[in-house]
Amino acid sequence: MLTVHHLVYSALALLMAGTATPAQTTGPPASAPPASASEQVTGSPVVRLSSGRVRGLDQGAVRTFSGVRYAQPPVGRLRWAPPKTAEPWPGVADATKPGAACPQAQFPGVPPTDEDCLSVNVTMPRDTGGKRLPVLVWFHGGGFTTGAGSQYDAKRLATQGRVIVVTVNYRLGVFGYFGHEGLAGSGTFAMADQIAALRWTRRNAAALGGDPRKVTVAGQSAGGMSTCALLTSPAAAGLFDRAIISSGSCLIDWPDGGLFPTAPGHTPYASLATTRKDGAALAAKLKCDKGSAKETLDCLRALPATELVPHTQAFADHLTYGTPLLPVHPADALRKGTFHRVPVISGGTRDEMRSFIGGAIMAGQKYTPEQYTELMSKAFGDQADAVAARYPLSAYASPALAWATVITDRSWACPALEGDRLLARRTTVYAFEFGDRDAPNVNGVEVPGFPLGATHATDLPSVFDLGGRYALKTPPQQRLGAQMVGYWAAFARTGDPNGQGAPRWSRFTGKGPVLGLVPDAVKPIGYSADHKCAFWRSIG
């Protein structure tokens, strides 16, 4: 069973994993929902791409090409190696169904997995109107250890937004972030996959009816953190023209005790020394610590993937800096201004941490008034009294809600605001906060008396169709979804999210504004005051 830290970070609160408790293993569909009667297959289009021809599907107003290989299978000697361009194939390859997800723990809702997993899924309007469409490349979330591109049905985004959407599989966990002395690319194999997918998109956009000069990279949670990191990667220079970061600021981190008193601090990034140390520990654990790095890696590469998957959580937080792809910590790159000058949309959800705390409760963690004091002391040391004075228990319905608010503000909201300020010094930024506290619960967390509100990942159903119980239920939610699709699509098209049918979204200047995304109430909000960011900045 997962530890509580991994349960809530890598399984519960990061999209598509469901929960790790046996009675609550829920999650979204393994792939896009089946076509409705009005979307039945009406054709089998064929397109010539850089590696060969593929046959996709026409479904109503939508055209898809699924499971298209963008790199060679990362197996054998290519396990823990930079991705190699897909070899040309003869004839016409089938692109009517998604490829396998990359190896990961098998939570309900996760598609079948295989190490041969480096594929993309393309969703586009069937009729492009003879115009080159902007392209949006999506990197999924999942704590760097779970998820797949096929879990995001982009039909509504493609048809309403008039964009081509490319969802990407990339290596996860131990396969994507493993490192070892003498292993080139340590800790950045997943990032190398993402860069390869962006190169694939540039090469093939025109063949698909897209504009290779209008490529937007986007992602949520781990995908958002990856997107922010790509902004700072020299290897990604010139591969995208805009970026959308959702719940993935480069500055996100958690203090020690952020979830419970013994929980370690968290940052998604690791130094090269840390990644290599953890790789050596894994090699020893698997009895592969041989006399040389080559012998060790040969031993590890000979292991079946199923023997490595149980250790994938050890590399959940190991997107590695001090490497050719990521020379410095992404937060430091933002502070120094060493990032690509492209327009950015950046934001998150109002109550990010509630699903994490709810997941910890489901795993048996208790939040009492006494423990609230203990958590304060563990996380904030000498500053605990000052924090407690700003977040008195009397202001909240329960200690759990109080602590979720503290860590949302300290670890997500205010670091994201600071990240936006750093970006806005040198490029155009549009900042948002998703605030629908009745949005579909995509996390599988259910705790009586503990409302999840607008928690982590609840913004996703407004942009993607996740199917069934994750659908937008009310007309106001559906209107908000249409507005968000409009914002995202306009931004992909022009670098400015403004268009017809939605309130104006003003550029973020460093002081504001932040656009609140709430059904029938889209407007600028007092974000910094709401999350007490001046206080958090004052105590460092």
Image (cartoon, rainbow, N blue to C red):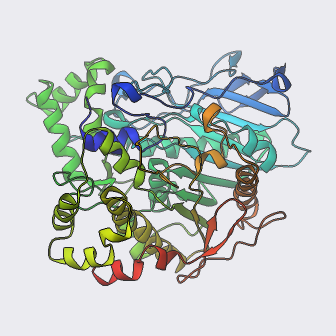
Question: Could you say which quadrant of the image residue 46 lies in?
Answer: top right
Q: Is residue 380 above or below residue 451?
A: below
Residue 341 position in % (x across, y down) = 57, 70
Quarter the C terminus occupies: bottom left
Q: Nearer the viewer, residue 394 or 303?
A: 394
Q: Residue 475, percent across and down?
A: 76, 49
Question: At which x and y percent is residue 478?
Answer: 74, 49
Q: Is residue 88 visible?
A: yes
Q: Residue at x 41, y 48 (%)?
A: 449
User: How many marks do you count on the picture?
Assistant: 0
The residue drawn where x is 30% and y is 68% is 393
Q: Residue at x 17, y 55 (%)?
A: 261
Give the camera-side residue of 167 and 92: 167
Q: Is residue 256 visible?
A: no
* Image position of 330 with respect to 477: above or below: below
Q: Position of residue 267 (x, y in %)?
A: 30, 56
Residue 195 shown left or right of residue 523 in the figure:
left
Q: Is residue 280 above or below residue 66?
A: below
